[in-house]
Amino acid sequence: MSKEIERKFLIVNTSFKKEAIKSYKIAQGFLSTVPERTVRIRIQDNQGFITIKGIGNKTGTTRFEWEKEIDINEANSLLAICEPSIIEKIRYIIPTNNQLFFEVDEFLGLNNGLIIAEIELPSEDADFNKPYWLGKEVTGKASYYNSMLTKKPFTKW
Amino acid sequence: MSKEIERKFLIVNTSFKKEAIKSYKIAQGFLSTVPERTVRIRIQDNQGFITIKGIGNKTGTTRFEWEKEIDINEANSLLAICEPSIIEKIRYIIPTNNQLFFEVDEFLGLNNGLIIAEIELPSEDADFNKPYWLGKEVTGKASYYNSMLTKKPFTKW
């Protein structure tokens, strides 16, 4: 259980890939996409997770978050009853200053073409290096929430 | 992970209470009440649970069900972001034949006056004793789902 403080950005080019120390495929779906109480099932690197998030504060930076690892087979069964459609993406982990990391998600399928960089921060006003490939900030913009991308995928914008 | 096979009944009088071997209070709320994917948070006897159910089959007897025990404090935090309103009830455990048990829920608050008996069965056609206090069967009737009772409580019927 925690408050999640994060900021989201678009990217200006794909040179971030050269800086990645790790990448893996993610498949995820939602049992609830209601912003006040999203329930997400995720499969990542042979691990399953259930994650529940509350609504964000005014700036969209901080959200209540609860996450538990669950059995991979159970995660697959739960994914099967999620809302259409399932999101698939490749996540790249990119270190920056102060032991912080960017998670850059390159979306596949119906969200092909969309790439979003996220950074999780220790506090709302925490400072961090902005790499040259980082673009416009989209923190708190609902259309970029993964829960919205299941309903209104990027290729349909 | 399992298929849940259960049948639900109204009751004709409250003499079931004399047969109860145990009773405890339950508070529960829903993160999703969509029938295809309900997500329930429950606090019962100082234990917390998260339960996810899929849609029932045609008769409403069998539903996909997944449940995990979770920390009681985490359950309380999750209850706080559930849909209004929270359901409170007293559950009575009543043994019947073949090592089966009735769970009889006496609802409180906005659902005051409603009492539902449920029996979980090993198969859809399993036989069981029907005690004299058991009334009309309401298996599969959506209005009696706890997830519906949060939205349309019994006292508003």
Image: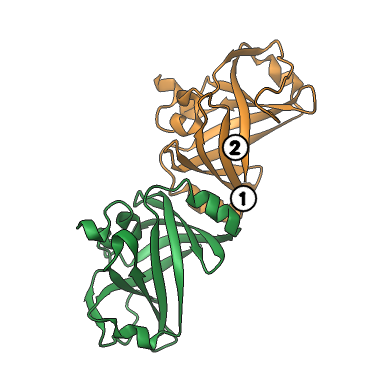
Chain colours: A green, B orange
Structural distance between the alpha carbons of marks 2 and 1:
16 Å
**Secondary element type, mark 1:** strand
The residue beneath circle 2 is B26
Residue at x-position 58% and y-position 31%: B62
Residue A57 visible, this orientation: no
Asked if both marks, 2 and 1, belong to the same chain, the answer given is: yes
Look at label 2 and name its amino acid: Ile
Question: Which image quadrant is residue B99 in?
Answer: top right
Crowding at label 2, few (<14), some or many (≥20) Cα neighbours within 10 Å? Answer: some
- Judge whether B121 appears above or below A154 on screen: above
Q: Which of the two marks, 2 or 1, is nearer to us in this view?
A: 1
Residue at x-position 75% and y-position 27%: B100
Which of the chains bears the disc numbered 1?
Answer: B
Q: Percent position (x, y) of residue B116? A: 58, 22
The residue beneath circle 1 is B68
Left or right: residue B60 versus residue A64 is right
Q: Which mark is residue B80?
A: none
The disc, 2 or 1, on the residue closer to the chain's N-terminal end is 2
Which of the chains bears the disc numbered 2?
Answer: B
For the residue pair B72 and A115, the one nearer the viewer reads as: A115
Q: Percent position (x, y) of residue A133? A: 26, 84
Callout 2–callout 1 Cβ contact below 8 Å: no
